[in-house]
Image (cartoon, coloured by chain):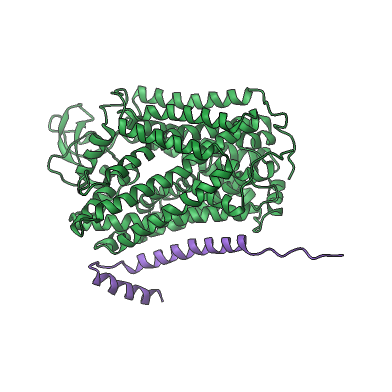
Chain colours: A purple, B green
């Protein structure tokens, strides 16, 4: 998956005049984004998920 | 009871304000450089370890103190034990001193912002011309720290206007802060995205991003990488200022603590990585456009923001003439807005402390703080201001202020309070529960790492002016030399020239180009930390902060409910 993404991105970069990023740089970039944004999205979802009202015991 | 305590309008407002405070100039000009210097992509690992073992635990601790003890840092710490109150005041005073020069940096950004409204960028498109512009036109730097040589009107006016803006924001309490952060927190992200889109579509950007993301795994074996990660996490999250405790105290006692801490820390880290994209894509372009090595254009701190990046923006004129003014306006506006949330949060935290203890009106407190703050900023607006900015930053921020406060805070909670009970209390109101690892981090990991950081930074800074170069003395044939001072480079090469002086016979040698490693240790204003006036000046600031903290602790509270149990 990462390899395919890298291939597409490399071709796009070449068209724009860049030599493209290395595969290891791509992997670390995707890993960083996944870890940080993943963490942020999960915690924000937990925070703003509608809370269950406590059941009426009477 | 605490009926009169201000409250945030919503949880989201608090989280946004806390993110605004944590995210600042350091995310933009410190993180990308630190990551690049310590393993590139591999820096993610030590950074995350540091975040989990120190950043998040300390953030939970500061939020926890604010929420559960319903007070600013001095009040919350005094509730643990009156003898810890001074740590809270010390944090606020150190924060205030930092704010004095932080506002001046924002003033410099504002000055550049105004200068950006021009068809041709006045600082030129080379690192040398931009450095000359900063030194001669913006800062008008004097010969040394003791030659004040009068004020710099441009920076002074911009800094004073910034203080007026901060006064107007904080004077109405958290209600107005909440309204302002709705605009000032998202704005830098929009501007950052504009810069990223432009940056990654430039020729050479991939080379720059390679430098930022390519992992050098061997760096993980170097202790300095881990130290840099812990330092970055600590300084980036606005810990040790008492801000997070003050902000959290405006939440009700049953508010979430842990998840809010996670969100703040993740958002701060995300911003740092976003900034990395914006910085390295432009640096890659600049290196390719000027046909130079990327390593020679990678800088951190003010040199990045006010020299390299503006020069890279100017270079966009090669593509289209409208680009430099547009992206320059975007960049300097972003710098200013990034800074202002952090700056006014410091004033808000201090005003909260004074309000808690002395029950003065907000207007009175904020007026006093703004006047004192603005008066303090004037010192940094002199022609020697940049030296004193560096000296104060070194003594109060890097070494003997924030880090020491972080250590004391962790000790106070970890060793002199019921840490397990505190954790259970925090967990009882939080969506995410933290386990015993938090106790271990607060009691052992955080103090140990911060002590390590304190010692290493002190040693490193004192060593800095003595950089050895490989150069043989023509007089005595000794091979050990030290770089003595920088000189203007008449040939406009990328690396500055340095005059070397023989360590053995003290003869001044010929000028040499420094290699990249030596050059990176330099910026344009070299402060000799072994020089007595610098040491005295630095320690005067540190001791003054401590003495004022002790005086504020000793003063009798005018609030009858100062340490009373709080209601919900």
- The residue sitting at 57% across, 46% down in the picture is B58
The N terminus of chain B sits in image quarter: top right
Question: On the rendered structure, is B498 left or right of B103?
Answer: left
Front-most of residues B370 and B118: B118
In which quadrant of the rendered view does residue B462 lie? top left
Q: How many marks?
A: 0
Percent x, y for residue B406?
55, 39
Front-most of residues B125 and B510: B125
- Which residue is the extreme one toward the right? A58
Question: On the rendered structure, is B136 left or right of B464?
Answer: left
Residue B510 in view, yes or no: yes
Question: On the rendered structure, is B175 left or right of B310?
Answer: right
Front-most of residues B531 and B375: B375
Percent x, y for residue B510?
14, 34
Percent x, y for residue B127?
22, 46
Percent x, y for residue B234?
49, 45
The C terminus of chain B sits in image quarter: top right
Residue B459 in view, yes or no: no
Front-most of residues B114 and B517: B114
From this view, report whether residue A46 is shown above or below residue A14.
Answer: above
From this view, report whether residue B98 is shown above or below residue B313.
Answer: above
């Amino acid at each position: 998956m990462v390899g395919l993404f890298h291939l597409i991105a490399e071709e796009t970069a070449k068209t724009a005049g860049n030599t493209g990023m290395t595969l290891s740089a791509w992997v670390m970039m995707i890993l960083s984004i996944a870890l940080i944004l993943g963490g942020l999205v999960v915690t924000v979802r937990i925070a703003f998920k509608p809370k269950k009202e406590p059941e009426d015991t009477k | 009871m605490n009926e009169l305590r201000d409250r945030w309008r919503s949880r989201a407002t608090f989280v946004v304000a806390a993110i605004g405070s944590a995210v600042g100039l350091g995310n933009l000009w410190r993180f990308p450089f630190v990551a690049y210097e310590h393993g590139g992509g591999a820096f993610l690992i030590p950074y995350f370890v540091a975040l989990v073992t120190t950043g998040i635990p300390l953030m939970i601790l500061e939020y926890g103190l604010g929420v559960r003890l319903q007070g600013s840092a001095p009040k919350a710490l005094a509730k643990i034990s009156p003898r810890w109150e001074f740590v809270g005041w010390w944090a606020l005073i150190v924060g205030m001193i930092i704010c004095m020069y932080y506002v001046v940096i924002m003033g410099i950004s504002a000055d550049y912002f105004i200068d950006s409204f021009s068809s041709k960028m006045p600082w030129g498109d080379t690192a040398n011309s931009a450095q000359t512009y900063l030194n001669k036109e913006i800062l008008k730097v004097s010969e040394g720290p003791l030659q004040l040589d009068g004020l710099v009107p441009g920076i002074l006016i911009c800094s004073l206007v910034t203080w007026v803006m901060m006064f107007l924001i904080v004077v109405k309490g958290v209600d107005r802060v909440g309204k302002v952060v709705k605009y000032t927190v998202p704005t830098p992200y929009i501007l950052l995205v504009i810069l990223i889109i432009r940056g990654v579509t430039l020729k050479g950007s991939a080379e720059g991003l390679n430098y930022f993301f390519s992992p050098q795994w061997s760096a993980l074996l170097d202790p300095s990488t881990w130290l840099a990660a812990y330092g970055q996490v600590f300084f980036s999250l606005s810990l040790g200022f008492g801000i997070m405790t003050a902000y959290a105290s405006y939440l009700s006692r049953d508010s979430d603590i842990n998840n809010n801490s996670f969100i703040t820390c993740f958002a701060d880290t995300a911003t740092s990585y976003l900034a990395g994209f914006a910085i390295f894509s432009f640096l890659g372009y600049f290196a390719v456009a000027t046909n130079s090595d990327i390593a020679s254009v990678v800088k951190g701190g003010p040199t990045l923001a006010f020299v390299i990046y503006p020069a890279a923006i100017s270079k966009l004129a090669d593509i289209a003439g409208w680009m430099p003014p547009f992206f320059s306006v975007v960049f300097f506006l972003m710098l200013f807005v990034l800074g202002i949330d952090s700056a006014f949060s410091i004033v808000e935290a201090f005003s909260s402390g004074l309000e808690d203890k002395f029950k003065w009106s907000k207007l009175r407190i904020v007026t006093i703080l703004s006047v004192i703050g603005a008066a303090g900023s004037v010192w940094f607006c002199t022609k020697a201001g940049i030296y004193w900015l560096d000296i104060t930053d070194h003594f109060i921020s890097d070494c003997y202020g924030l880090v020491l406060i972080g250590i004391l805070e962790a000790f106070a909670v970890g060793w002199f309070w019921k840490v397990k009970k505190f954790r259970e209390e925090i967990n009882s109101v939080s969506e995410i529960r933290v386990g015993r690892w938090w106790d271990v981090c607060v009691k052992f990991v955080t103090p140990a790492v911060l002590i390590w950081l304190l010692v290493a930074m002190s040693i490193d800074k004192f060593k800095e002016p003595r950089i050895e170069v490989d150069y043989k003395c023509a007089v005595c044939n000794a091979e050990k030399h030290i770089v003595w001072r920088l000189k203007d480079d008449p040939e406009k090469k990328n690396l500055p020239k340095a005059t070397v002086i023989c360590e053995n016979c003290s003869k001044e040698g010929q000028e040499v180009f420094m290699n990249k490693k030596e050059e990176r240790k330099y910026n344009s204003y070299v402060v000799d930390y072994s020089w007595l006036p610098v040491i005295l000046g630095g320690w005067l600031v540190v001791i003054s902060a401590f003495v004022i903290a002790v005086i504020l602790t000793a003063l009798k509270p005018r609030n009858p409910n100062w340490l009373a149990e709080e209601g919900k």
